[in-house]
Amino acid sequence: MSDKSSVVQNAFKAGSGATPDELHILIIGLIFVSVFLVLAYIWVNAFKDLREGNMKMSTFGGLIVRGVLFLCIMGYFLLR
């Protein structure tokens, strides 16, 4: 048990010395991951509706295109 706790302590020691640039990159990464997971959830549910016949292919394609455009625009503003 002490081996695991020392590994965790060493990880926190390494992270506590991070520069503001590294923290900025971490925050941007977390934002991208959370938004992508939300979009993936929406896309999976839309695909289920598409398979069941509750949604048209054009509507599903529109959701995909809007999500990709949103990611591109968000990426531009977050990474500039």
Image: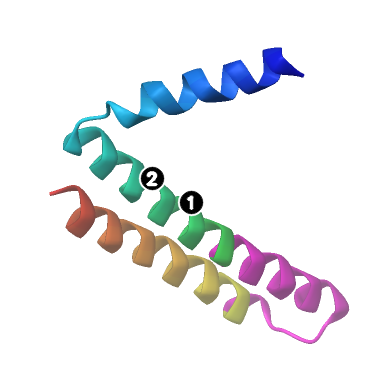
Amino acid bearing label 2 = Gly
Figure quadrant of the N terminus = top right
Identify the disc placed on residue 33: 1
- Magenta segment: 39-58
Amino acid bearing label 1 = Val
Q: Quadrant of residue 6?
A: top right
Mark 1 Cα-neighbour bin, 10 Å: few <14, some 14–19, many ≥20: few
Measured as percent of width and height from the top left, residue 72 is found at 31, 57
Measured as percent of width and height from the top left, residue 14 is found at 38, 21
Q: Are marks 1 and 2 in contact (CB under 8 Å)?
A: yes
Query: Quick one: SS at disc 1?
Result: helix
Q: Residue at x 32, y 49 (%)?
A: 28
Measured as percent of width and height from the top left, residue 77 is found at 18, 59
Q: Is residue 61 left or right of residue 5?
A: left
Relative vertical location of residue 49 with respect to residue 65 in this rendering, above or below: below
Relative vertical location of residue 21 with respect to residue 2 in this rendering, above or below: below
Along the line of sight, which residue is nearer the eye, 13 or 56? 13
Measured as percent of width and height from the top left, residue 48 is found at 80, 71
Q: Is residue 25 left or right of residue 13?
A: left
Relative vertical location of residue 44 with respect to residue 17 in this rendering, above or below: below
Q: Residue at x 76, y 75 (%)?
A: 50
Say if the magenta span includes residue 61.
no
Residue occupied by mark 2: 29
Q: Is residue 22 left or right of residue 38?
A: left
